[in-house]
Image: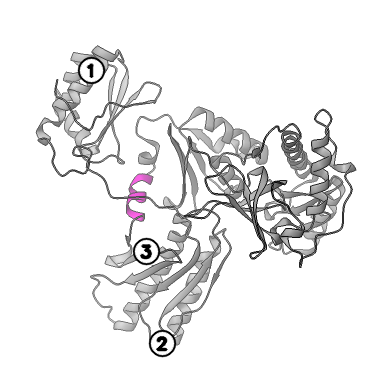
Amino acid sequence: MTSEVIIDVQPKEISIALLEDKNLVEYQNEKREEASYSVGNIYLGKVKKLMPGLNACFVEVGSERDAFLHYLDLGTQFSSFEKYLKQVQSDKKKLFPIAKASRLPDLPKEGSVQNTLKQGQEILVQVVKEPINTKGPRLTCDISLAGRYMVLIPFGDKVSVSSKIKKGEERTRLKQLVQSIRPKNFGVIVRTSAEGKRVAELDSEMKVLVKRWEDTITKVQIATKTPLLAFEETGRAVAMLRDLFDPTYDGIHVNDPDIYQQVRDYVALIAPEKKDIVKLYNGTVPIFDNFSVTKQIKSSFGRTVNYKRGAYLIIQHTEAMHVVDVNSGNRTRAENGQEANALEVNLGAADELARQLRLRDMGGIIVVDFIDMNLAEDRQLLYERMCKNMQKDRARHNILPLSKFGLMQITRQRVRPAMDVNVEETCPTCFGKGKIKSSILFTDQLESKIDRLVNKIGIRKFYLHVHPYVAAYINQGLVSLKRKWQMKYGMGLRIVPSQKLAFLQYEFYDQNRQFIDMQEEIETNS
């Protein structure tokens, strides 16, 4: 199986696609200009309101809605953290080292929030779940710093090894190695990717994580106001790679020089021999179009998703759960009858649904209405197929066998809102009003924009992105429309077909690939 990561960097957002055998299996999109309360961010927050009935409190961390912190999420070492925080904040010039901090008794599990916290108190918290719908972020005081091979836990006292490492000898070796390099007052969780690694590699990452902690606590030390973002999780591109990166990757393609350098530096740090798989994409065709990602996004999102031979899924998101209906569509019956036909459709649905769960990052409760099957062995076969397909999924999940009504219930870890891409296009020429100018005049409208760009604004080198059909029309003929425009306005004009654009939509970019807004709701003819 070949795996590739495609990173599309735009002025307002970054999109990341993971392809397995050229098929899109994971997709992430992050706005660049908005504040992002990403999982892993550490804040110095302030207790806003105590909720004794819930045994929880709301904490101000700067988000639109206050974040939620349950008593059990304070962590067993909360008392040690609280004392250390006071020691750090008492001296703004010299940082109190965590190695000298004293460990206090564990916080009792049956305690109450009103006896532990008070309104207005400053506490160090970490985001464990992003804001979803009407809910604010979910927090913990059990701080952890994740790396490629291990997770560092301040005030922890144990070294744990991932249960996915099965060999007893390797588990013992890793535990002893990490124990020998572990700084005082830190606990460590050894991740699966550490299997077979040498002590030098583990020690190198340990130093990086300890430095990350020191930088975080230094920000807290000199803080003059709360809430304060003390540590920001690495950019989505690097953060996703940290969890996903596999030495078998065939390529990581990036279309932005700065992000390319960040990704290359990160890969060089964790897998020096694989740094050359990171490649800077310089093509004129948009990077997602070049790797057939745009087409897959448009066909994979939306309410209805088609798969094998006319069968399709209908996916609906309600407030409480995701509901999936499996339909056979216009398929003809299999030669062996209705039962064989139902099994074939359901098995195909299980393959597509496993991909959709990863692709949309659907979480919470998912209920799937498969086509009814009479044979118990067929129902068991479907359940086993679903379990096998979900083995590649990194999110924690649980799958129950089919119920009497042919329903399968799945729970899947939810840490951020489900990815929702609107595949319906608003008409770019009428802006949803239902009336457009004659389409035959579209090229005249484009020429007027080019004339304004060149002769009034003074930009002579630029890219014009249009729908592939329109691009074909502009380029057709020996003396094409493109050639006429170049002769009239200069050779700095380049036409780029873009699959993400609607039929009569267009976008201008300068030679540095910066977007130029040339579209107005009331188009004027010059």
Where 450 sits versus 404, above or below? above
Give the color scheme: rainbow, by chain, secondary structure or one colour.
Answer: one colour
Q: Would you say 457 lies left or right of 77 here?
A: left
Q: Nearer the viewer, residue 81 or 32?
A: 81
Where 447 sits versus 176, above or below? above
SS assignment for the magenta stretch, majority: helix
Indicate the position of residue 268 as horizontal and vertical percent values. 64, 36
Q: Nearer the viewer, residue 226 or 1?
A: 226
Pointer 1 with pointer 3, Cβ within 8 A: no
Residue range of the region highlighted in magenta in the rendering: 293-300
- Amino acid type, residue under disc 2 in the picture: Leu
Crowdedness near tag 3: few (<14), some (14–19) or many (≥20) residues, C-alpha within 10 Å: some
Indicate the position of residue 461 as horizontal and vertical percent values. 32, 17
Q: How far apart are the alpha carbons under marks 3 and 2?
A: 28 Å
Q: Which mark is residue 263?
A: none
Q: Which mark is residue 452?
A: 1
Could you tell me which residue is drawn at 16 percent across and 33 percent down?
Answer: 473
Q: Please tell me whether mark 3 or mark 2 is closer to you in this view.
A: 3
- Amino acid type, residue under disc 3 in the picture: Gln
Q: How far apart are the alpha carbons under marks 2 and 1?
A: 70 Å
Crowdedness near tag 2: few (<14), some (14–19) or many (≥20) residues, C-alpha within 10 Å: few
Crowdedness near tag 1: few (<14), some (14–19) or many (≥20) residues, C-alpha within 10 Å: some
Q: Which residue is mark 2?
A: 375
Q: Please tell me whether mark 2 or mark 1 is closer to you in this view.
A: 1
- Amino acid type, residue under disc 1 in the picture: Arg
The answer to which of marks 3 and 2 sits earlier in the sequence is 3
The answer to which of marks 1 and 3 sits earlier in the sequence is 3
Q: Which residue is mark 3?
A: 316
Q: How many marks?
A: 3
Label 3, secondary structure: give it.
strand
Label 2, secondary structure: give it.
loop
